[in-house]
Image: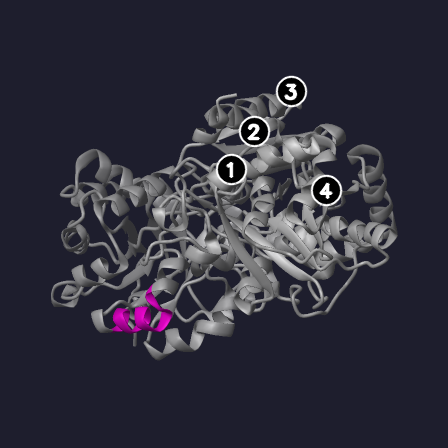
Amino acid sequence: MNRIQQKLQEDKKLLSLYFTAGYPNINDTMSILQQLQDSGVDMVEVGLPFSDPLADGPTIQESSTAALKNGMTTQLLFDQLKDVRKTIDIPLIVMGYFNPMLQYGVEKFCAKCQEIGIDGIIMPDLPLAEYEAEYKSIFEKYGLINVFLITPQTSDDRIQQIDAASNGFIYMVSSASTTGSQSGFGNTQSEYFERIANMDLNNPQIVGFGISNSDTFQAATAFAKGAIIGSAFIKHLTAHGADSVKAFVKTIR
Amino acid sequence: MITETQESYQADERGYYGDFGGAFIPEMLYPNVEELRSQYVQIMQEPSFQKEFKALLKEYVGRPTPLYYAKRFSKKYNTKVYLKREDLCHTGAHKVNNTIGQILMAQRLGKTRIIAETGAGQHGVATATVCALMGLECIVYMGAIDIKRQAPNVARMKMLGATVRPAMSGSRTLKDATNEAIRDWINNPVDTHYIIGSVVGPHPYPDMVARFQSVISAETKKQLLEVEGRENPDYVVACVGGGSNAAGLFYHYLDQPDVGIIAVEAAGKGIHTGESAATSALGHEGIIHGSKTLLMQTPDGQITEPYSISAGLDYPGVGPMHANLFRTGRGEFISVTDDDAMQAGLELSKLEGIIPAIETSHALAIFETRKFKPDDVVVINLSGRGDKDLNTYIEYFGL
């Protein structure tokens, strides 16, 4: 069983954090991962920076631009992570955009992930139809879990299709937005979280976008299995430096 | 004018032109794009849509545009050159054919808010124009650097009632303006229609925009029949940035093997100078703005910034139709430097009394090196007029 699937079976609400590899400094990747694990974080999305991150708001755009300027590349990230499984045992997911993966070579990318011990991939701009037609067999060959997104506008039919194509969790985008563009949840979100919870899907849901503190973490996980924090964590790293991970996690739970 | 075709160089049902196209979009955009995809052909074929579209093209845009035999230019290059005068369209370029079509589409989809991206400002102006015409809210994203470079077009958009929002991310030019427009659409999924200005973006945009622009070749066929006694020229020539004016001129000739297709890209300061926008020569297959196509990028898959003296040609990708024309060899791709384009623009002004947009000047410049037979009939899309480029012409020639 994949580390993600094991983690999802634990009887607790999961806290997952996203950070952009190569930010704030080019060689922070391993140190940030170690601090996240030591702080009790359940899962991590390692962001592979892209020049044109069109689903992201300003915070992640800026961290991506800075990371690329620092010299981050796909190969460098894989090199930094080559011994990660000697010290880190929480599930690791690579999150990015599809073009860098395509240029590296989809099969080569997946093989490298398996070799390193990456458990899953989130590529927001690799949609269901293209994934199933072209790439599913490759992801599966290397034991990688592909995570799809749903939003408040996703129809029930499509949610069922996505559920059927998923084998880990569903990334539930909290509202119609890019990353980092809202604070707090209203009734609309709660109703949406509850509606999805009542659909009785095969895959648990983890909420992302708009979670920045203990309150929003609690609200998001009232119905869902867990929550992912990205922009708020990046902002914290910008303000307090790459050694301040523990202090941030404490503000969440 | 808008016909269903199953022929090989057109998009297939999934929006693929050979290996290129598709819809590589985040799930947040799926409902909007799917709504459009499932309805665009049907809406375009409705008689009421056709009637309104044709009436606006005639009475508001000023179509049909003339097909003008350029006598002195033809004589100089010893071949028969016709200019399809899209520069005479309202707002000064072919761009408005598409924005008229898309605003009617948006209305039928019940959308009340319009967004667009623009580089040089031509598509922004064409979008602001149709929004004023229909009384719809209009927001145009434009790179902060382009806003400075293209002040008159920014002023035109403002006069037309549009809000111009600067794109501050990345290189702050066209590709970043496109990113910002896409982000806006993600944040406003219900009431907003995104009017993309070229044959780029996720399916169905490349095909939809090509169909709206196909009026150019539909008219050319009729007009050529009158003057030459045949619908098909020997060659059609157009400049390509994203490729909408080219798609319009090529459209009804794509599957006519007797018609040669010539696409002209901007070489900038030279293909290998690092300051170029010649995507077919410098690009590799990848994903940009939701479409699989040829694009300029680093070996690591980061999209790079193109350069051309012409703001309408400096897009790092190219429409998937054109990527396929290049890969299959159906199209002949030629790149033209800044200097050669500027000289060609000046030459047409002096020979024919027509000051072309600098984008268009690239297409005119090929005649110095690409020779045609004396009895060849060559149609060039004169996609835009040069008023907007006067400052660049003034600076370049010291006028």
Mark 4 vs mark 3: in front: 4
Residue type at tag 3: Met
Which x, y percent locates residue B232? 77, 60
- For disc 3, the marked residue is B159
Mark 3 Cα within 10 Å, few/some/many (few <14, many 20+)? some
Counting residues from the start of the chain, the first of labels 2 and 4 encountered is 4
Mark 1 vs mark 3: in front: 1
For the stretch drawn in magenta, the main secondary structure is helix
Q: Are marks 1 and 4 on the same chain?
A: yes
Residue name at image x 50 percent, y 51 percent = B335
- For disc 1, the marked residue is B310
Counting residues from the start of the chain, the first of labels 1 and 4 encountered is 4
Tag shown at residue B389: 2
Vertical position of residue A77 compared to residue A240: above or below: below
Which x, y percent locates residue B123? 61, 37
Front residue of A221 and B69? B69
What secondary structure is marked by label 1? Answer: loop
> Magenta stretch?
A104-114
User: What's the distance in space between the residues labelled 2 and 4, CA to CA?
Assistant: 21 Å
